Amino acid sequence: MEKKQAVPSLLTRREMLGITGIAGLTALTGIKADAAPRTAQVKPRIACLVTYWGATRSHADWIIAKLMDGYWWQGAHTPSGIEVVSVYIHQFDTSLLGQKVCKSKNVPIFKTVGEAVTLGGKDLAVDGVVIVGEHGDYATTLKGQWMLPRWWIYQQVIRVFEQSKRSVPVFNDKHLSYSWDEAKWMFDKSRELNFPLTGGSSIPVHYRKPDIEIDIDTPIKASVMLGGAPDEGALFHCVDVLQAFVERRKGGETGVKSVQCIRGPETWTWTEKNPWAAKLLESVRANMDLKPGHFQAIEKPNVCIVEYNDGTKAAIYNAREVGWTYAAEIQGHKEPTIISMLEWPGPFSQYHASNSQPHWIVETMVTKKEPFNAERLLLSSGITAFNMESNWQNGVYSPVGRRIETPFMNMTYRSTRGAQFNKGERPPNVPYMRGFAE
């Protein structure tokens, strides 16, 4: 998947200073970049490694622009607590917006991942790494998995960590990888090298209706998650929201026992045979005042069925007109608990979607602590991967996917953090500014 990256034929004086001021320091003086005086440096220095940054709706733009300029958090604009000091763009030629932003901010774009995290030197020279491996021109597998090179980027970061005998916090946007083996390797390396790992979807920390969190040790018996989930990338958002809630159940997370995917009309056959899912689905329909049969009218229905080791059940439905909505059957409660993450605020609607995520990226880089257990990110990655695998039997697609047992996902942990989602006033209806003309 490696693609040789083009670089600008001519660099401006400011761009050259951005590179030689750091990387050239070693060559000219013999002083290592990381050993240079940093008395004025109070913010963690971050390397941002992306696949594509060519549109205002690309994840790289949503996330990195806020790490540079600040973000809307808890009712107010919040200055960023980190400094972006280097960028690597895998699909450089088509990432004109990223080139423009970096030029305006005097942030150098390096030719390789290694150079971006060493700032052109030999050893690790940043305090944190942000990987945004989302969007770009990449192939898909026959199973519908987008072959984004997140692992490819991550393993080059790990190589620098190991040779430098030092590691720093890493954020990885969305799921770790489309491959379980790669995702597990990424998680294991974070534990082996003892660095904080975080990432996932921005939806679990988006505004909620009602504005509540489920208490830790809530006796959740069954859950339904609804949202636009026609493909792997969209499904992950739903899976990650589900995991953010179910990990707070009584006794904590016990790991995933099995995953199964069913597509087409058979989705509703399965639902009829599982009253717990049908009841929760109907509760959401009634709560949102949708017409009877609303969910059954979707063009391409599918359901991802998750069994947990403690007997808890969950189903994730591809749905419309519900934003992202979670419904739980809780022991001792007569009515289901329903929590929705609905519309985006502001004129650049999707740009504002990730406002909470940069806050937690900054928190991770500053405190060097994970905002939530990285095991959640691994489980969400695994559920997504095996959902896509389920419909393939001996290389042939089947709408009723096989139930895949997942004993290797027997991870146990307890959620210890309180509410992490955004609250307060929404961003004002004014365009965001980056300090240069659009």
Image (spheres, rainbow, N blue to C red):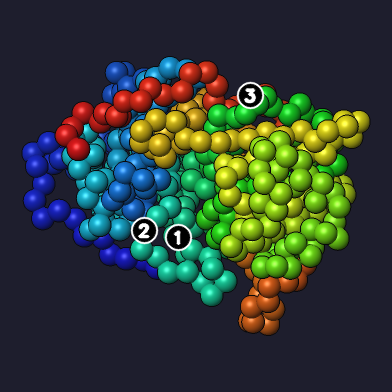
Label 3 to label 1, Cα distance in Å?
A: 34 Å
The residue indicated by pointer 1 is: 148
The residue indicated by pointer 3 is: 211
Instruction: Identify the mark nearer the N-term, 2 or 3.
Output: 2
Label 2 to label 1, Cα distance in Å?
A: 8 Å
* 2 or 3: mark nearer the eye: 3
Q: Would you say residue 13 is visible in this rendering?
A: yes
Image-based side of 51 in relation to 225, left or right? left
**Which quadrant of the view contains residue 208?**
top right
Question: Of the residues shown, which amino acid type is indicated by label 1?
Answer: Leu
Label 2 to label 3, Cα distance in Å?
A: 35 Å
**Which quadrant of the view contains residue 372?**
top right
319, 51: nearer the viewer = 319
Image-based side of 326 in relation to 129, left or right? right
What number is the disc on residue 118? none
Vertical position of residue 83 compared to residue 51: above or below: above
The residue indicated by pointer 2 is: 136
